[in-house]
Amino acid sequence: MVVGHGSKFGRKKEEAIAALLSQKNIEDAARTATIGTNTLLRRLQVPEFQDAYRKARREAVQQAVARMQQATGAAAITILKLMTDAGVRAAVRLRAAECVFDQAIKGVELEDVEARVSELERLTRESKSGTDEMMSSSSQRRVVCRSKGISRSGS
């Protein structure tokens, strides 16, 4: 077993993925990772590498979204200031107002969907617990019937 080779490949894979995430194209990523372009292209065909790269991209996007979410308060203040500032061109104020309406409507729609999903989840839990109780009750009846020598057909 060659321990060094496996750890080197893992490190090189991570370097290649980091380079793919930070560089503008494959050639630059390969150069940054100090591997050949063809090597990087081959690695991009390997399912395990694809999975790791996809996971890294997803994590990068999630971090970017989190940063954007942290800035929503400042964005809202900016939009509201633009919308209410008489010194700002009418077209800009109108666009800011449209943005406020769009976001308000999306918020209401999201709340509606969340309420509907919560209700469906509640009904599913109730239905499942009712089914479990019925199954448990049915099992108990079978045990009682068997202990009394009663068959399903009633004979």
Image (cartoon, rainbow, N blue to C red):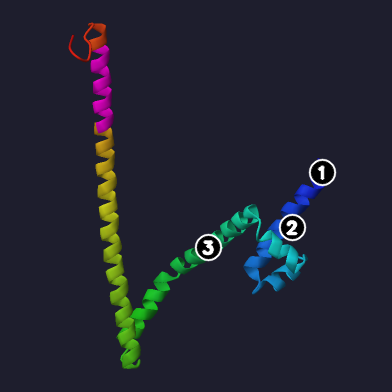
Mark-to-mark CA distance, 2 and 3: 23 Å
Residue in the picture at 28% in, 36% down: 128
In the shown orientation, is residue 49 left or right of residue 38?
A: left
Q: Is residue 134 magenta?
A: yes
Q: Is residue 46 magenta?
A: no
The amino acid type found where label 2 is placed reads Lys
**Residue 63 numbered tag:** 3
Dot 1 or dot 3: first in sequence order is 1
Query: What residue does disc 2 label?
Result: 12
Question: Is the magenta region chiefly helix, strand or loop?
Answer: helix
**Measured from the top left, where is residue 80 in percent x and y?**
33, 80
The one nearer the camera, 37 or 114, is 37
The amino acid type found where label 1 is placed reads Val
Mark-to-mark CA distance, 1 and 3: 36 Å
Residue in the picture at 70% in, 69% down: 29
In the shown orientation, is residue 26 left or right of residue 83?
A: right
Binning the other alpha carbons within 10 Å of mark 3 as few (below 14), some (14 to 19) or many (20 upward) gives few
Residue in the picture at 34% in, 93% down: 89
**Residue 85 numbered tag:** none
Which residues make up the magenta segment? Answer: 131-144
Please tell me whether mark 3 sits on a helix, a strand or a loop.
helix
